[in-house]
Image: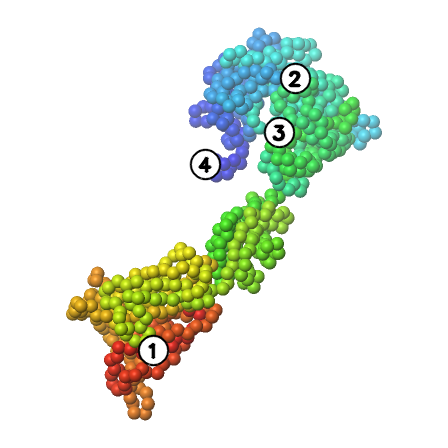
Amino acid sequence: MLRAGAWVATDPTLQFATDGKVVPKTSAVSMAFSGGGTGALLTGVKDGRTLSLTWDKALPKPTLAANVATYTNVLPDVDLQLKAEVEGFSQLLVVKTAAAARHPDLATLKFKLGTVGLSVSADPATGMPSAVNPAGQKVFTASAPMMWDSTTTGAPAPAGSAGAGALAAGEGAAGAPSDVFLMPSGAKEAQMPTTVAGDTLEIKPDQALLTAAGTKYPVYIDPSVVWGDRQNWSWAYRSWPNNSYWNTKEDVRVGYESDTNGLSRSFFQLNTANIKGVQVSKSTFRIRETWSWSCTPTPVELWSTGPISSATTWNRQPGKGTKLDTVTAAKGRAECAAGELEFDATAVARESAAKGWNSVTLGLYASNESDRYQWKRFDPKTMTLETEYNNPPATPSGLGTRPTTGCAFGGAIGNTTVSLYANITDSDAGALSAQFQVFRGDAMVADEWIPALRDRVSTVVIPDAKLPSGNYTWRVRAYDQSLYSGWSETCSFSVDRDRPSKAPRISSTDFPDGSRGWPATTGKARTPGSFTLSANGVSDVVWYGYHTDWDPEVKSVPRLVSGLSAIIKLTPPGAGPHFVYAVSQDKAGNRSDTTAHLFYAGRSAARDQAGDLNGDGNSDIWSNDSFGSLLTYAGQGNSKFSTTNGGAKFGTPRTTGSGGVRTATTTWSPWKPTRSRRPTGCGPTPTTASVASGRTAAERSRWPARTTRQAAAPTGTTTGREPPRSSTPVISTVTADRTCW
């Protein structure tokens, strides 16, 4: 059991606590016995509810032996014993002599009841005391109180049996267990009437048995208060057809007992709530046989039965169901020691699992109920139902795709590799696998198996070749090498591997195209202008991205109606040439090639300030790098300088020709070529774009050209130590097999 955060073994051995009470070392329930004097004889606490019994006289200090506390001479020659068990307790009055049996206090035994959170009353079906909580659940119950004397019997074996000689020699020896809390075979017995009167429990011992001339002392009186809400059992006894032996602390009996002409059957209720829905491979019912008539093996049968309750008696037995197993054995004598019997209960365990029962009830019957040699006794506290089973894995959950789409409504995925994932779990440990199936219409296009870990997300990559452009559905299930889970919900997605066939078009009436030189009419620097981004005939464009030579941050125009244009506002910061770059994207995330719009901004009426190198009204910085190149860093107007927009590197002269003539040239690419696919949105079609030189060093570092070819110098280009000043920039051709963000 768990105590103070650590697992410890149960041990009902009694000891004195610091407050003088007697308690077990470790038990599954809370209990305390009197340490002597007045006060409660015993106290039990279950689920926060308390029941106590108090003897009406002061008690002596008990002597402790293992798990038994003995209070000597509570009446003359009458001892009171309390026994602690792992999950409960037992009480016993031991009447040692005939003189003691005539004590007037033994006419009616009275125990004062104390409760917290409980209501004690007589069970209407059995008349036995029952303590229930406010919800009506039984916390403490009492089976029919019994008393018995010390008469025992040693029964002969059938003629010709293997143990006949040994038993004949030992006839008359005790054949029942030595525990005084258990009634021995052959004992004279009687049931005691019990009533609850207010806060007093009254038990009337049978005076005929107590004082008869043939009674053998000691006589044992068992008040029999037990825990409720547990694995339950009941013994049905023909000699007392209306008596309930619900959860009796005595051994239960099976078969015909010739000494008393009694016939017994025993029933056991076992919890099966934890195997609901599992696959049962094997189930074994075990119980300890404590006594048999002889050492000659005889059969006992295990049956499924109807439910039992505290109202179960011989006259109210459960219905008999299906015979499950027969075991032939003999245990519980000196020559054949007590031991465990095992019955195959697989059939009823499977039925319970399939039908979702919370419990099953089993019954033990003698095969021949008129054969005294089949009479047996069993210890009900040892009963177990051991079931080997396997839970199927849980249906996978948390389904998704990468790139992300919604399961129920799907979504478009571009020209990229598709991954599917789901959370796989199983209540049992063991190896797991996940099976992913992908369908296009009714045709399965992928059936992928991957190893899976319990309570982890499993991801499978679907080969591109299996997912051309189209609409798809998919599902997944788990497998534990024995059982499959149910199929998951069905999810959907679509694949579009065709990127926009044309780059978008950029146009502006405020700052018209300047690819053929400075337009006759154009806007002024630091004056806003409108630019139109259009799909260029591509029907499924839903997004544009753009940036400029003075602001490299990509901005977007989202949520377009397919194929429509968008108007953006831009303000060139300074006079001279400028660029606007744009890319389009379809609903699947595929991006087009990049287009560039060269335009010129005229000088504004206001003169540039000192230190303003690019005409944007902010002070800039010039600096040399370690290679001697002249760099410029654009001021942002907030005491910061842009290293992305700034750092423009002027062309470094290089020597060409035999005369050592140097020509200043600059080449660059506005977009970084790459082969990666979505989300970078590259396309498969090689493109060639013509753009003007003049970008900054930082831009060249960010987007190096894949290949470059120097174009012929335009008219007016000269050779010499210094490049000419010209209003027309040098043109470079940039070729890339993919253009991407």
Residue indicated by mark 1? 731
Residue at image coords 54%, 16%: 121
Mark 1, residues whose alpha carbon is within 10 Å: few (<14), some, or many (≥20)? many
Which quadrant of the view contains residue 254? top right
Q: Which of marks 4 and 2 is nearer the N terminus?
A: 4
Q: Determine the residue located farthest toward the right in the rendered image.
A: 160
Residue indicated by mark 3? 381
Image coords of residue 68 (percent x, y): 56, 25
Residue toward you, 124 or 155:
124
Residue indicated by mark 2? 243
Mark 2, residues whose alpha carbon is within 10 Å: few (<14), some, or many (≥20)? many
Residue indicated by mark 4? 4
Cα gap from disc 2 to disc 1, whole angstroms: 111 Å
Cα gap from disc 1 to disc 4, whole angstroms: 82 Å
Residue toward you, 672 or 539:
539
Residue type at numbered disc 1: Ile
Residue at image coords 36%, 73%: 669
* Camera sees residue 87: yes
- Please give left or right for residue 585 compared with residue 724 in the image: right
Q: Earlier in the sequence, mark 2 or mark 1?
A: 2
Cα gap from disc 1 to disc 3, whole angstroms: 97 Å
If the image is split into quadrants, where does the C terminus sit? bottom left
Label 4 element class: loop
Residue type at numbered disc 2: Asn
